[in-house]
């Protein structure tokens, strides 16, 4: 099969960057009537929130507080077979780790600035930082692959097997978050004293959380209880005077 010309390849990339697909090589973008995009599966769509991180201090704090964010620190990379040292990935006990969290994945909600704290850090084997201006390399955060140009591989430049510090999305996908979750609680003395309980994960839409107390009583949001992330709290609300030790709660959420 004869390959496309360089001009056609450039046109395809240019059109695709503007979400269009060309149907003829002399076509202008505005003349195309067809959209170009990628197939996205539900298990590739992030369902958990990740907080904006201006710097690595904020990113570290998010990784500690949020189970959807996992930090790998100075982990050795593994060469992708057949890549001649040009492509590497993060191997965690046989797992191809991905997706990395890119700074542009989590922009600021007001300024649209990227989360610089999630920037991948690349190191020589002796743990000396490799800056973006050294050598010739880039990162495919979605694929979880660090790529080096031919002639600029870590071995070509004497860096040894590289290491990486990176933040990885480890939260739920939309395919799992769409399933209804059910949790049952029998309130303890501690629960009554604390005036709250914790769900095992954060509901996607708090208005769709259903809570039933044994006997048929249904809880009402902001009247009987409040919901902040995964915490169901009734301090200062109606349930403060109604719930008691050994009461049974059944909770449904998405």
Image: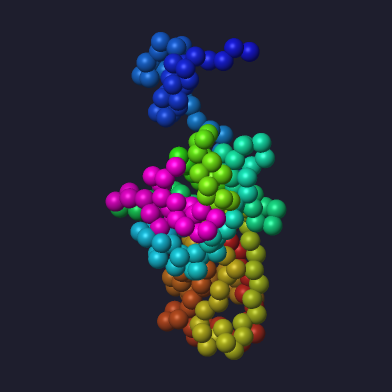
Q: How many marks?
A: 0
Q: Residue at x 63, y 13 (%)?
A: 1
Viewer-proximal residue, 232 or 66? 66
Q: Is residue 209 left or right of residue 33?
A: right
Q: Residue furthest left?
A: 111
Magenta highlight range: 111-135
Instruction: Find residue 214 and report its horizontal and vertical position in percent.
Output: 64, 76
Viewer-proximal residue, 27 or 118? 118
Q: Main secondary structure of the magenta part?
A: loop
Q: Residue at x 53, y 47 (%)?
A: 158
Residue 143 quadrant: top right
The answer to whether one can see residue 69 in this image is: no
Residue 40 drawn above or below residue 15: below
Viewer-proximal residue, 131 or 62? 131
The answer to whether one can see residue 197 in this image is: yes
Residue 45 drawn above or below residue 191: above
Instruction: Find residue 180 and report its horizontal and vertical position in percent.
Output: 63, 57
Q: Residue furthest right?
A: 94
Residue 120 included in the magenta stretch of the image: yes
Q: Residue at x 67, y 40 (%)?
A: 81
Viewer-proximal residue, 205 or 124? 124
Instruction: Find residue 238 and report its horizontal and vertical position in percent.
Output: 47, 79
């Amino acid at each position: 099969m004869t390959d496309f010309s360089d001009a056609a390849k450039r046109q395809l990339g240019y059109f695709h960057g503007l979400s269009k697909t060309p149907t003829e090589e002399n076509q202008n973008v505005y003349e195309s009537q067809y959209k170009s995009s990628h197939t996205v599966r539900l298990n590739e769509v992030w369902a958990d929130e990740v907080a904006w991180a201006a710097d690595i201090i904020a990113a570290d704090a998010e990784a500690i507080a949020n189970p959807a964010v996992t930090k790998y620190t100075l982990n050795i990379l593994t060469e992708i077979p057949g890549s001649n040292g040009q492509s590497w990935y993060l191997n965690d006990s046989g797992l191809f780790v991905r997706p990395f969290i890119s700074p542009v994945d989590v922009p600021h909600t007001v300024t649209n600035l990227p989360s610089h704290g999630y920037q991948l850090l690349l190191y020589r084997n002796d743990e000396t930082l490799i800056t973006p201006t050294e050598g010739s390399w880039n990162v495919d955060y979605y694929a979880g692959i660090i790529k080096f140009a031919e002639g600029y591989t870590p071995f070509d430049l004497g860096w040894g097997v590289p290491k990486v510090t990176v933040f990885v999305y480890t939260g739920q996908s939309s395919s799992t978050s769409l399933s209804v979750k059910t949790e049952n609680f029998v309130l303890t003395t501690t629960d009554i004293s604390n005036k709250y309980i914790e769900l095992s994960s954060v509901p996607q839409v708090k208005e769709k959380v259903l809570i039933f107390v044994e006997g048929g009583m249904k809880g009402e949001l902001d009247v009987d209880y409040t919901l902040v992330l995964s915490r169901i709290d009734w301090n200062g609300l109606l349930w403060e005077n109604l719930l008691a030790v050994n009461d049974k709660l059944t909770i449904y959420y998405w």
